Image (cartoon, grey):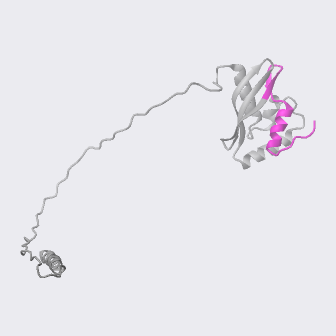
Amino acid sequence: MKPYALLIVVLALLAAACSGSGGSDATVAAPTTIAPATTTTVPASTTTVAATTTVAPTTTTTAAPVGIVPGEDAEVDAVVATYEIVFSSKTGYDEKEPYLDDPTGLEETVAKYQETGESMGGVELAPTSVVINGDSADVTYDLLFGGTPTYPDLTGDAVLIDGTWKITRDMFCAMMASARVGCPES
């Protein structure tokens, strides 16, 4: 039945083309013969093709070290460790106390800072540059909330007291004020 349907469509198209000219000099096309459709059955076969995977080459570009290189300078590493301990919202008062110049009465401040940190996914300072000048260090750091640098290139300091790098009370309390956690008067 399919060959007849195709024949009807072709004849309808021819009729439309002939009647559309409207004039007496219309050209009549010769009838077209359409051969009946044939069906060929192909036996099923199975072909197995091995999978080929092409992986693009990986290019790694290593920039020259910028900032702090862990292990390069023990004093710089000590200042970085001090910042990481003192300004992490995950460390408690007992961990911070040896690294604070004047820790007197800061227990409640540290507890509030830990609560603030929990609500923000963690608060920490990540030093990016440390310049040591005798018993003091100038520190450039990023302030991170939830591990994401939020305020980059801030500056602070540290002091060497009895062989240990410490954070001054002024520096610590300034950071706590930024976190909306106040320090008591000393």
Residue 10 in the image: above or below residue 124:
below
Query: Does the magenta segment cover residue 120?
Result: no
Question: Which quadrant is the C terminus positioned in?
Answer: top right
Residues in magenta? 157-186
The spot of residue 41 in percent (x, y) is 12, 63
Please tell me which residue lies in front, 150 or 183: 150
Question: Which quadrant is the N terminus positioned in?
Answer: bottom left
Please tell me which residue lies in front, 61 or 96: 61
- The residue that appears at 91% across and 40% down in the rendered structure is 184
- The residue that appears at 14% across and 78% down in the rendered structure is 18
Q: Total label count?
A: 0
The spot of residue 71 in percent (x, y) is 64, 21
Please tell me which residue lies in front, 118 or 147: 147
- The residue that appears at 65% across and 26% down in the rendered structure is 67
The spot of residue 65 in percent (x, y) is 59, 25
Query: Does the magenta segment cover residue 158?
Result: yes
